[in-house]
Image (cartoon, rainbow, N blue to C red):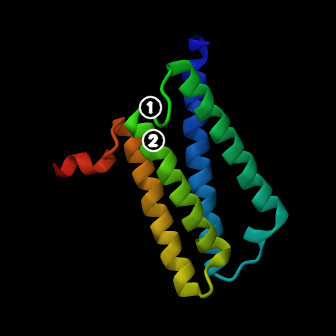
Amino acid sequence: MIEFYPQIRHVHIAAVLLSGGLFVLRWLSINLGARWPMAAPARYLSYTIDTVLLTAALMLATILHQYPFVHGWLTVKVLLLVVYIVLGTFALKRGRTRATRLAWGFAAIIVYAFIISVARAHHPLGALLWLR
């Protein structure tokens, strides 16, 4: 299965970018008063992209024999993913005011960027490595 690694990795990276891009688009649109971001097609597109993302991640972990709670950087990614999801739900629907939705959204984007930095560095500190 290692022969499919490059293709699966590219699918994973594309799904990461699509997922983050769709989140930002939905978040900005909601804060501008649009209703479409919470409509079924937008939500289902998000679920589909995230399912592809998770499937590719599990395939990569299996191919490379690198697993969360065994390898520190993957553990950090999984834990931050949970934080990102919670922040995203507050940014898109649970935030009571526009100001709180904006704050939750900015926090989610920061966590998203840090997850990417951890993935690029293959280190739990991600972008914080540059501060050492």
Disc assigned to residue 75: 2
- In-front residue for pair 89/43: 89
Q: Is residue 5 above or below residue 92?
A: above
- Quarter holding residue 54: top right
Instruction: Name the residue that disc number 1 marks.
Output: 70
Asked which secondary structure carries label 2, the reply is: helix
Q: Position of residue 68 (x, y in %)?
A: 49, 36
* 90 on left or right of 109: right
Disc assigned to residue 107: none
Q: Position of residue 36 (x, y in %)?
A: 77, 71
Residue shown at 61% from the left, 17% from the top: 4
| Residue extending farthest right | 40
Report if the CB atoms under discs 1 and 2 are less than 8 Å apart.
Answer: yes
Disc 1 marks a residue whose amino acid type is Val
* 17 on left or right of 73: right
Q: Is residue 124 above or below residue 111?
A: above
Q: Earlier in the sequence, mark 1 or mark 2?
A: 1
Disc 2 marks a residue whose amino acid type is Thr
Residue shown at 53% from the left, 70% from the top: 105
Dot 2: within a 10 Å radius of its alpha carbon, few (fewer than 14), some, or many (20 or more) residues?
Answer: some
Residue shown at 63% from the left, 58% from the top: 22
| Residue extending farthest front | 69
Q: Position of residue 33 (x, y in %)?
A: 68, 83
- In-front residue for pair 15/60: 60
Residue shown at 63% from the left, 68% from the top: 89
- Quarter holding residue 11: top right
Question: In this figure, what is the number of numbered marks?
Answer: 2
Q: Is residue 27 above or below residue 119?
A: below
